[in-house]
Amino acid sequence: MGKDWLSAANLVFWTRLLALVDQCLEDSEIKRDEYIRQLGFENNDRADVQEKSLKAHRDSQLQNWKTCLKKQKENKKVAPMTKGRIDALNSRVQQKLIEIENGRNLNHHKMKSVSV
């Protein structure tokens, strides 16, 4: 079983110890900030790919629906349904683009430092 080290308070250089702790905290904060920055870059890259893919899909679908609509120009019953599909596609894509844009913002927080 260990014994109390009664003279420890006289032997430990508290100012040096506190300076080392402060340096460690500062270094870890710098690394944390860099890590969050890197995550932000990766997140924006991912959002860019999603956005580009979604827009390409929308453009392809719109081309198909517009071609279909040209063929249906004379049919007054079917043409409005096709226009409705185009509007619905645009609405869904717009909503998804908003979701992607909102996903660009990373939520993070820093815990308060503990005083020694």
Image: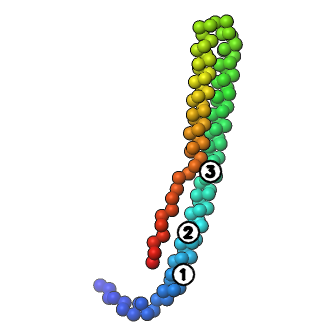
Tell me the SS state at disc 3.
helix
Q: Position of residue 116 (x, y in %)?
A: 45, 78
In front: 80, or 45? Answer: 80
Q: Residues within 10 Å of mark 1 (few under 14, many from 20)?
A: few
Residue drawn at x 62%, y 45% as measured from the top left:
46
Q: Which residue is mark 3?
A: 42
Q: How far apart are the alpha carbons under marks 3 and 2? A: 21 Å
Mark 3 / mark 2, whichever is N-terminal:
2
Q: Is residue 8 above or below residue 97?
A: below
**Mark 3 or 1, closer to the camera:** 1
Disc 1 + disc 2, Cβ < 8 Å? no
Q: Which residue is mark 2?
A: 28
Q: Position of residue 53 (x, y in %)?
A: 64, 35
Q: Position of residue 85 (x, y in %)?
A: 59, 20
Residue drawn at x 53%, y 85% as measured from the top left:
16
Q: Which residue is mark 1?
A: 19
Residue drawn at x 65%, y 19% as measured from the top left:
65
Mark 1 / mark 2, whichever is N-terminal:
1
Tell me the SS state at disc 1.
helix
